Image: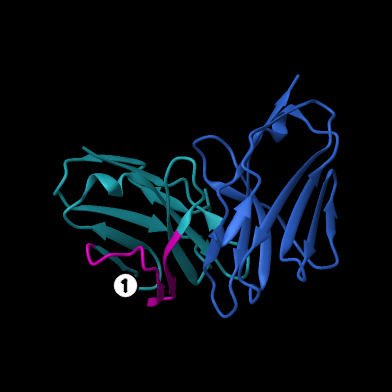
Chain colours: A blue, B cyan
């Protein structure tokens, strides 16, 4: 079983749609959780950290369920500029290394 | 530009040659990381420094790979006797807390 697994994608959605990304992780000792965004041929950039209480940043909502070892990202009212690959990322216990999922590519279509 | 910088941005080499990449982190960040990313995959952790101390190394980091951060500022990653399987994007990141900031990467092609 891979350490971090994401929906394989790609997702092709029209502008204005709501899209949800799902992710599971295998290490129950994981301590930190993130969603990164990576544009084509660019470096990953932090989109948002994910907390057990859930957190929202504008059109983006992230949720963490530690019992199920499940992380989600919801994008509402998607824009053309949201087109990118979304990477689910988990940080270990006592370690600063990050473990990335393969990413899910999103294309928002006019 | 106060972000993470990496040089060179692209490197093409022949199998068996040695290559060295440089990473300049954000100046106040004491932690520096190296990752490798191949097409269609997420970045994979290679190694991590806190100041000049190399504290973690992945199993992916074979004996042909060595990384240094001699003065706790910039870092170098050297690959000796390159193989075609080393072709990838090598990403450097730095942090002072949980958020890691990535550089633009060095794309290595081994012919």
Vertical order, B33 against A109 (above or below): below
Q: Which is nearer the eye, A9 or A30?
A: A9
Residue drawn at (73%, 58%), measured in percent from left and top? A71
Q: Position of residue A1 (x, y in %)?
A: 55, 61
Question: Magenta segment: does it hold A70?
Answer: no
Residue drawn at (46%, 66%), measured in percent from left and top? B32
Vertical order, A44 against A94 (above or below): above
Q: Which chain hosts label 1?
A: B
- The kind of secondary structure element at disc 1 is loop
Q: Residue furthest top?
A: A110
Image quarter of the C terminus of chain A: top right
In the picture provided, is B21 more to the left or to the right than A32? Answer: left
Q: Which residue is mark 1?
A: B70
Residue drawn at (85%, 67%), measured in percent from left and top? A53
Q: Give the quarter of the image for residue A59.
A: top right
In the picture provided, is A41 more to the left or to the right than A70? Answer: left
Q: Which is nearer the eye, B35 or B103?
A: B35
Which stretch is magenta? B45-64
Q: Position of residue B1 (x, y in %)?
A: 52, 48
Q: Give the quarter of the image for residue B74.
A: bottom left
Vertical order, A25 against A15 (above or below): below
């Amino acid at each position: 079983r891979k350490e971090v697994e994401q929906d394989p994608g790609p997702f092709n959605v029209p502008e204005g749609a709501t899209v949800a990304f799902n992710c599971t992780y295998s290490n129950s000792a994981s301590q930190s959780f993130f969603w990164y965004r990576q544009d084509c041929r660019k470096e990953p950039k932090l989109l948002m950290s994910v907390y057990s209480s859930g957190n929202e940043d504008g059109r983006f909502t992230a949720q963490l369920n530690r019992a199920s070892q499940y992380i989600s990202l919801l994008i509402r009212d998607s824009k053309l500029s949201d087109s990118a690959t979304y990477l689910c990322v988990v940080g270990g216990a006592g370690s600063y290394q990050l473990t990335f999922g393969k990413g899910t590519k999103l294309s928002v279509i006019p | 530009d106060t972000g993470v910088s990496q040089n060179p941005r692209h490197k093409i080499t022949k199998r068996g040659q040695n290559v060295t990449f440089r990473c300049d982190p954000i100046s106040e960040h004491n932690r520096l990381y190296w990752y490798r990313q191949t097409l269609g995959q997420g970045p994979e952790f290679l190694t991590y420094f806190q100041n000049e101390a190399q504290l973690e190394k992945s199993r992916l980091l074979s004996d042909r790979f060595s990384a240094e951060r001699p003065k706790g500022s910039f870092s170098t990653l050297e690959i000796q006797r390159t193989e075609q399987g080393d072709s990838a994007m090598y990403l450097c990141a730095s942090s002072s807390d949980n958020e890691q900031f990535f550089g633009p990467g060095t794309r290595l092609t081994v012919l």
